[in-house]
Image (cartoon, rainbow, N blue to C red):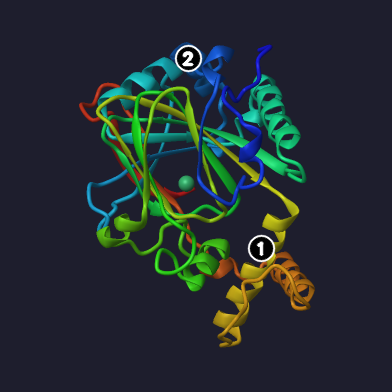
Amino acid sequence: MENSVIADWEPRYAENFSKENLLLHHRLNETGLFTREALAELIDKCPAQNYNLNTMGYDHENPQWREGIVRGVSGKDVISSIERGRMWLNMRAVESVDIRYKHLLDKLFSEFESNVPGFDSFKTKMGILVSSPLVQVFYHADIPGQSLWQLEGEKRVYVYPAGEPYMSQKSLEGIILGETEEEIPYHSKLDEGATVYELEPGEMVHWPLNCPHRVENMDCLNISVTTEHYTSDIRKSFAVNYANGVLRRVFGMNNLAPSINGPMVYPKAALALVWRKLNLNKSKQVKRMIDFTLDPNADNGIADISAYAK
Ligand SMILES: [Fe+2]
């Protein structure tokens, strides 16, 4: 791909990059890496540890989020089953599965780095989401910097400001400690503060760190890409929130500053590192169970199996 990945970058975007929501147009479809044929091939070689297959209910109060597995089904049949069913396939870190996605990921972040002075990213990752018509991803927040790129189909994306009342400091710490997966309390009243995008192929949205968001697919198969990244500020924020989470939960402390500047940042980073190294948080972390396989012969594409730990 000779062209830049972003089709409509303007220098004025640099100042507020990652500080405000940003809707841009992209050329990822020109790579040929996201056609159904290319993705069927990628699914065929995607190891189990690199994907999550999920199905979910219809209600925020009762998400019924379930985890499944693909066994002995071709990538092509996986996509057509998802098109008929109610599923969500998330291939994670595809840059480690096929070098072509790694090259694209590197190109994309070097483009942002040359466009945004001072933006220096690392631990970049690319995920590919293949999801059924009308499915949703419930209200949640992610730990790294995030962007969502639309390749096929349409989805409605609600992006909420970070912080109260959208997400408490304690909820964010819970996500970072791995206690709550990424889901956080939601009420439809919060939608008043959301920015809503009807994302079409060729569009992408990037939002500030930890902004809660939720997604509703329109009535069509959706193919989307997520990219994630860290910067030194994101890493500091992770360490401070991790340490605050431990201090609040284990030592009963409150009034914990989430600031990534100031004298407490380094002791907190050290605490986070030690706590993680010693695996002291392990017992509280959410454990996932697999309880269905993808079945192209079933109406909804799902066959129940007895649950086992992933
Ligand atoms: Fe997300």
The residue type indicated by label 2 comes to Thr
Residue 57: x, y in percent?
25, 47
Along the polypeptide, which appears first: circle 2 or circle 1?
A: 2
In the rendered view, tell whether residue 267 sits above or below residue 176: below
In the rendered view, tell whether residue 248 sits above or below residue 200: below
- Residue 98 appears in view: yes
Q: Is residue 133 left or right of residue 94?
A: left
Q: Is residue 55 left or right of residue 258?
A: left
- Which of 98 and 237 lies nearest the eye of the viewer? 237
Residue 262: x, y in percent?
75, 75
Q: For residue 103, what is the image quadrant? A: top right
The residue type indicated by label 1 comes to Ser
Residue 173: x, y in percent?
55, 68
The residue located at (61%, 47%) in the rendering is: 16
Q: Is mark 1 within 8 Å of ligand 1?
A: no
Pick out the residue farthest to the front.
12
In the rendered view, tell whether residue 72 sits above or below residue 235: above
Q: Which residue is mark 2?
A: 35
In the rendered view, tell whether residue 14 sits above or below residue 105: below
Q: SS at mark 1?
A: helix
- CA neighbours of label 1 inside 10 A, class few (<14), some (14 to 19), many (20+): many
The residue located at (78%, 78%) in the rendering is: 263
Q: Is residue 111 left or right of residue 16?
A: right
Q: SS at mark 2?
A: loop
- Which of 109 and 267 lies nearest the eye of the viewer? 109
Q: Which residue is mark 1?
A: 237
Label placed on residue 253: none
Quarter of the image that includes the N terminus: top right
Counting labels gives 2
